[in-house]
Image (tube, rainbow, N blue to C red):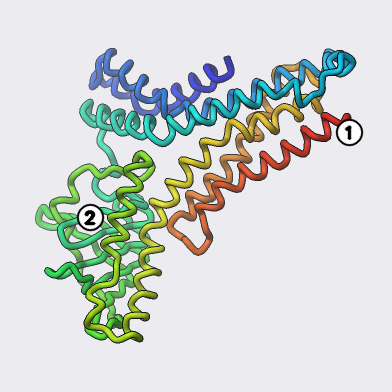
């Protein structure tokens, strides 16, 4: 029941924000609305399953403790660990279901949902230059850390020559999209262009020229957050292959070492968003187990029958868990802060705290 409630609430939020406006403006049919809602269900289930599991654990074991049933169970010679084992096994099973949805089903449904909205008239704001996503062209890669519409932040452009050797790259903290004579250009602020010299070193010069946005940027690009795990793996292999050391035969040992160091730094910066999404999808799949493990002893300790208390406690714990995820997402363009490890932190914290609390509850402490 709690899973159904959270699924309905999350679906309602998305429906009111995107789908309902299309229905009111007669841009969507009733059948299209039901199809869009159906495509959203797998995506919201990733959040609804762990939230529902923890809320249920808090409500059931809170009432269990308040009605003195725990005392009755112990007097019958049944330990708390034996009692909660089936619930923990169920949470592990739901972790497997969450992983299946999170790594494969939800990304495909999410993209199908966006394509459906696009067909019904809702314009995708991140279709051309999605933030935190590498856009590949014929002889270049374009990456931005944040896209506020016309204003761009943390811009990186990498260019290859006809022999597929990286010959120059551009870095700019800020930029802006402008339309001139019907063509979209990018204006850079405080930009630096680095040219790859023959000895493997890079020469830095100030760059002030506008950069024309190629026509192939107009195509819809799948954001990393909407890619399946296999798509992210393929994208990561492609990026690592493109950012390999160019023609090492022409370089001395010292020049080769310098270029390898430079390319490793560039590779770390560019591939981190894709790596982060891979870690995020796997890490959040284990939320059911951590939420259940901490929810059972907290429900016993609370010793409350009220439903409101259980729901309020669940929402507070959900906020703590996903606060780590939000912090990690905000730092995914900063590999020096290891954002891929931040999203694993709440799992370790919840599981460790839950194991200790459950052990203490089993001992009657």
Can residue 20 be seen in the rendering of this structure? no
For the point 25% across and 15% down, the residue is: 29
Q: Quadrant of residue 289?
A: top right
Residue pointed to by mark 1: 365
Q: Nearer the viewer, residue 15 or 101?
A: 101
Alpha carbons under labels 1 and 2: distance apart: 59 Å
Neighbourhood count class around disc 1 (C-alpha, 10 Å): few under 14, some 14–19, many 20 upward: few
Can residue 178 be seen in the rendering of this structure? yes
In the figure, 264 relative to 133: above or below? below
Name the side, left or right, on which 70 lies relative to 96: right
**Mark on residue 136?**
2
The local secondary structure at tag 1 comes to loop
In the figure, 329 relative to 79: above or below? below
Q: Nearer the viewer, residue 326 or 253?
A: 253
Q: Nearer the viewer, mark 1 or mark 2?
A: 1
Q: Position of residue 143 (x, y in %)?
A: 31, 58
For the point 25% across and 19% down, the residue is: 28
For the point 42% across and 52% down, the residue is: 275
**Marks 1,2: beta carbons within 8 A:** no
In the figure, 292 relative to 244: above or below? above
Name the side, left or right, on which 82 lies relative to 77: left
Neighbourhood count class around disc 2 (C-alpha, 10 Å): few under 14, some 14–19, many 20 upward: some
Name the outermost residue toward the left: 181
First along the sequence among labels 1 and 2: 2
In the figure, 342 relative to 31: above or below? below
Q: Nearer the viewer, residue 326 or 182?
A: 326
């Amino acid at each position: 029941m709690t899973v159904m409630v959270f699924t309905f609430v999350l679906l309602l939020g998305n429906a009111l924000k995107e789908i309902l406006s299309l229905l009111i403006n007669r841009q969507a049919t009733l059948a299209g609305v039901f199809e869009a809602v159906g495509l959203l269900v797998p995506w919201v289930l990733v959040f609804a399953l762990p939230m529902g599991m923890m809320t249920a654990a808090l409500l059931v074991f809170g009432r269990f403790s308040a009605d003195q049933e725990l005392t009755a169970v112990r007097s019958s010679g049944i330990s708390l660990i034996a009692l909660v084992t089936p619930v923990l096994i169920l949470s592990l099973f739901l972790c497997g279901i969450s992983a299946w949805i999170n790594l494969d089903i939800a990304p495909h449904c999410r993209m199908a949902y966006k394509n459906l909205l696009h067909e019904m008239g809702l314009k995708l704001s991140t279709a051309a230059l999605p933030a935190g996503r590498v856009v590949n062209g014929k002889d270049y890669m374009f990456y931005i850390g944040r896209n506020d519409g016309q204003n761009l932040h943390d811009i990186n452009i990498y260019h290859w020559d006809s022999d597929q050797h990286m010959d120059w790259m551009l870095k700019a903290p800020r930029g802006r999209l402008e339309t001139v004579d019907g063509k979209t250009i990018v204006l850079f602020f405080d930009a630096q262009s680095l040219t790859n010299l023959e000895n493997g070193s890079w020469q830095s010069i100030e760059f002030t020229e506008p950069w024309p946005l190629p026509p192939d940027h107009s195509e819809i690009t799948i954001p990393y957050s909407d890619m399946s795990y296999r798509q992210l793996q393929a994208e990561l292999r492609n990026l690592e292959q493109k950012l390999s050391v160019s023609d090492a035969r022409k370089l001395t040992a010292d020049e080769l070492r310098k270029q390898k160091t430079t390319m490793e730094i560039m590779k770390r910066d560019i591939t981190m968003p894709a790596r982060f999404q891979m870690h995020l999808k796997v890490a959040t799949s284990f939320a059911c187990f951590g939420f259940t493990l901490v929810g059972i002893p907290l429900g016993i300790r609370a010793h409350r029958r009220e439903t409101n208390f259980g729901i309020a406690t669940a929402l507070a714990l959900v906020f703590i868990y996903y606060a780590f995820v939000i912090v990690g997402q905000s730092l995914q363009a900063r590999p020096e802060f290891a954002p891929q490890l931040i999203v694993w932190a709440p799992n370790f914290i919840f599981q460790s705290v839950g194991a200790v609390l459950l052990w203490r509850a089993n001992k009657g402490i």
